[in-house]
Image: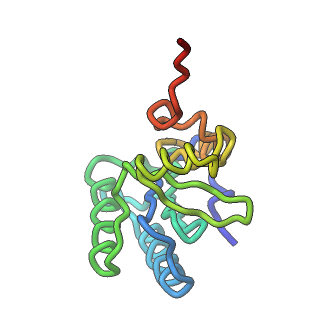
Amino acid sequence: MSTLHQMPAHSRVWVYASDKLLSSTICDQIKLEVKNFASEWISHQNPVKAEADVLFNTFIVFMVDETINGVGGCSIDKSFQFVKQLEKKLGLNFFDRLKVQLLWEDGSVSSFNKAELQSLYNEGKIIDTTKSFNNTISNKQEFDSKWIIPLKDLWIYNSIKPSQISI
């Protein structure tokens, strides 16, 4: 079970989305590594109260309670470099910000680029209310209320929906 729910609402959040669904074996490996990283994370020589997990076999999520010890640029860079090392070691990509992840009714997640989303939308396979992930959230309160949102509320929506032209 994830420990992310224990973090306070003001905790900072970073979400890294994999470019593909992670196998259970890879997911378990990453989960162990991110939890170890979070437990050893330091900022300005002091421990950071952090939690991390892998969700939906797609997302690495880090949360930090900055009331204990704030994270600065160097410690954030360490987390960034940690994820980059995971990418290299496992042949994954967690930094393709142009991919959008959709949550299907069966609980599975798929990643799509803009052209793929446009096709799915035009074919009626996704609609305005299709659940999507807003990976631009910055704190746990947003994570709890605005991470999973309807596609119509996502940043890419206006560029994929067909224009309504009347003649």
Q: Position of residue 13 (x, y in %)?
A: 50, 49
Q: Decide which of 37, 48 is in the foreground and name it.
A: 37
Q: Quadrant of the N terminus?
A: bottom right
Q: Considering only vertical position in the picture, is 144 above or below 62? A: above
Q: Considering only vertical position in the picture, is 116 above or below 51? A: above
Residue drawn at x 65%, y 48% is 131
Residue drawn at x 41%, y 52% is 113
Q: Decide which of 38, 159 is in the foreground and name it.
A: 159
Q: Extreme front residue here?
A: 167
Q: Quadrant of residue 47?
A: bottom left
Q: Quadrant of residue 149?
A: top right
Q: Is residue 28 visible?
A: yes
Residue drawn at x 49%, y 59% is 111
Q: Quadrant of residue 5?
A: bottom right
Q: Considering only vertical position in the picture, is 56 above or below 91? A: above
Q: Is residue 8 visible?
A: no
Q: Position of residue 74 (x, y in %)?
A: 26, 53
Q: How is the image coloured?
A: rainbow
- Lateral position of residue 38 relative to residue 8, left or right: left
| Callout count | 0
Residue drawn at x 48%, y 37% is 160
Q: Extreme top residue here?
A: 167
Q: Extreme right residue here?
A: 105
Q: Position of residue 148 (x, y in %)?
A: 63, 47
- Lateral position of residue 73 relative to residue 63, left or right: left
Q: Extreme bottom residue here?
A: 25
Q: Position of residue 8 (x, y in %)?
A: 64, 48
